[in-house]
Image (cartoon, coloured by chain):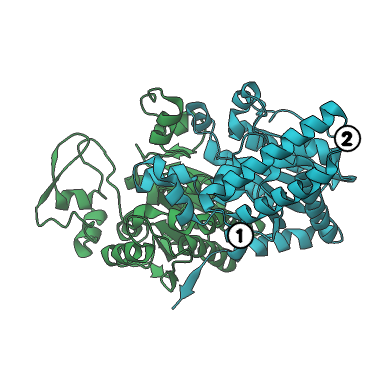
Chain colours: A green, B cyan
Amino acid sequence: MALDRFFRRRRPQPQSGAELPDLWTQCPQCKAGLYNRDLEANRFVCPKCSHHFRLDAGQRLAALLDEGSFEQQSGRVHPTDPLSFQDTEPYLERLARAQKKTGRPDAILTGTGTIEGMPVTVAVMDFAFNGGSMGSVVGEEIARAAEHAARTSTPLVLVAASGGARMQESALSLMQMAKTTVALEGLVARGLPYVSILTDPTTGGVTASFATIADVIIAEPGALIGFAGPRVIQQTIRQHLPEGFQRAEFLLEHGMVDDVVDRREHRAYLARLLGVLTQREVSA
Amino acid sequence: MTSDTLSRLEAQVRDLETTARETGQNLDAALTPLKAEVERLRAERSANLSRWDRVQLARTPGRPTALDYVERLCTDFTELHGDRAYGDDPALIGGPARWQGTPVMLLLQQKGRDTKSKIKRRFGSANPEGYRKAVRLMDLADRFGLPVVSLIDTQGAYPGIEAEERGQGWAIAESIRRMVRLKVPAVCAVIGEGGSGGALAIGVGNRVLIQENAWYSVISPEGAASIIWKDASKAPEAAEALRLTAEDLFDLGIVEEVIPEPPGGAHLDPDAAARALGEAVSRSLAELSGMDGETLRAQRARRFRAMGAFTEV
């Protein structure tokens, strides 16, 4: 299978903390013991119960784009500490730690690539970087990716994985919700499709801005997606939350996403969908 | 210490005023200097307020709500109800009115003025219907060429099961986008609490103003404290860290103008607070009135596209 070849040739970055020399991982859902190699070959979906493990940005691109097609655009924009924010540790130290852990300046990776041969612009959030939180850099890179897509007449595919706007940049983070929205208008003006893929977890200011104004929104099975976090809701209403609340399937049922799509199907799904939306000629 | 002196003087003023009213005596000779001293002490105290003090002032019982300002500044307000899809939200209301004479479309976050109405209005925290109603009213504003005036006062969008079922995030995102697209002037004023996306949903203005004792932040101080220290009682520390006061936001370039409040806060003299708010909004409306729709949209887009702090290597 082509996938096997892909993953054998380019081992994804091990997730931080999980840099185990071990050969296997236990599925948190069905508790099955899974060989890491099998898990990777299956795009980090449990072959037994289809539990979708979280991916970092690099793993995500490998799962989404044609092999070897990615050209990175993000990376030149770096975060600063405009508020001199200090909580349990200074913001700059928190950033340095996340940068070291992920090898990225911030919680976003953008660039271009192809999906079954079709050129696309991609923006992938990295939950491994400070919970994928959106500060000025994430906002700026997403805005630039949207502008790049408009300039090059390519569809935009965005993968959300974020706890929401980043507290440590306060109102500046909040403003990224409007900034990204402004930048996405260029795609609308040029009739270019924008597809958003919501993954576990997508909450807060990301759910309330660019991630949910896409032309088509799909979600990964079982992903937690919502505006307010379940803990906040529980504290407010002091009731038990219903089974499956804020999961991808719950959102599909309530009409908030176009479909719940297994990660292993994303590439084929996007190729089919974008092919029709862009009225691409089908090669015989 | 100052506040002790101040409350003693305030009590004296109240007593003298009561005596004057009840006995018909003219006590101005005693009252005038006392009142002046009260004003001076209030101003002095305002200058030394901590960020948490400002948050407290923004929440003071008796602080004018959006409708208190509308009653003082607007005529011909027609409240329009409902999102035409699910329901009507009492926490985010609006409709056409004349703002000091100028026809506008109002979008108001309304907290309620007594216990009953506060509960009904969920303390100003809107459900998705509220944001969808805002979208509908912005459609009308564009259609009839009415500038949008929004008064922001919410701790945040309502965090409830039904709100999530009906797409709270989706509704806020649509409201932001609708505001980005407006071809009419949009002037927004934070008049109390500017909590997170629920506030920004009606905050995408050509001009964004904020009252002196209002706050605006990505998260409430309590929310931040419970995330950082797992302890909501650390909200005062969180307020400091979040830099959420009017002055902070002005320094960060997020608002164009800080609207002064009467010494001690808007609740002490709602009429004076309304005059300052009315004047500031009217002035912004006048500045924007000559611009065509595309220029207004482009100016608003540039304003928000430029926001953020980063370095480029």
In the displayed structure image, the side of residue A230 where residue A97 appears, left or right? left
Task: Specify the quadrant of the image occupied by residue B71.
Answer: top right
User: Can you say whether A115 is above or below A151 in the image?
Assistant: above
Residue picked out by circle 2: B76
In the displayed structure image, the side of residue A20 where residue B307 appears, left or right? right
Q: How many marks?
A: 2
Q: Nearer the viewer, residue A130 or A45?
A: A130
**Residue at 47%, 59% in the rendered image:** A169
**Residue at 61%, 59% in the rendered image:** B247
Residue closest to the far bottom: B313
**Residue at 45%, 48% in the rendered image:** B236
User: Can you say whether B274 is above or below A94 in the image?
Assistant: above
In the displayed structure image, the side of residue A220 where residue B58 appears, left or right? right
The chain carrying label 1 is B
**Residue at 58%, 68% in the rendered image:** A151
Q: Nearer the viewer, residue A46 or B210?
A: B210
Task: Specify the quadrant of the image occupied by residue B252.
Answer: bottom right
The chain carrying label 2 is B
Residue picked out by circle 1: B247
